[in-house]
Amino acid sequence: MRRQTRSILQELNDIGAKPKAENLVDSRAAHVIESAINVIKMIKENFDNETASDLEKRFINSIKSGDPQKFARGIKNYKKGRDSDVD
């Protein structure tokens, strides 16, 4: 007869009550907001004022609209402009 083993996560899942949705949302939101703040800080530190302002707006609009491509296009435009300056 073979003994069935269980992972620690399975055991903890069975023991504890399921976390409430509002607690999960609160926790995840706190992490996402902290990460967003760090991204904005990095933008401001690594780009000139005009570019940083544009990228910050695109970043926030990407989050609002749920379209990450808005921010990606801004980065792509920056890279394209930087690459043409080098030539």
Image (cartoon, rainbow, N blue to C red):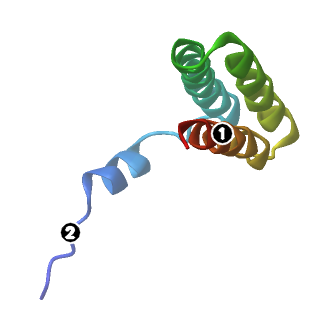
Secondary structure beneath disc 2? loop
Amino acid marked by disc 1 = Ile
Amino acid marked by disc 2 = Thr
Give the image location of residue 51, x and y in percent: 70, 22
Q: Is residue 78 left or right of residue 87?
A: right
Which of the 4 image quadrants contains residue 34? Answer: top right
Q: Which residue lies furthest to the left in this view?
A: 1
Structural distance between the alpha carbons of marks 1 and 2: 49 Å
Give the image location of residue 7, x and y in percent: 26, 59
Label 2 crowd bin: few (<14), some (14–19), many (20+), radius 10 Å: few
Which quarter of the image is occupied by the N terminus? bottom left
Give the image location of residue 65, x and y in percent: 87, 40
Residue that numbered label 1 is attached to: 75
Residue drawn at (85%, 33%), measured in percent from left and top? 64
Residue that numbered label 2 is attached to: 5
- Who comes first in sequence, dot 1 or dot 2? 2
Q: Residue furthest bottom?
A: 1
Which of the 4 image quadrants contains residue 40? Answer: top right
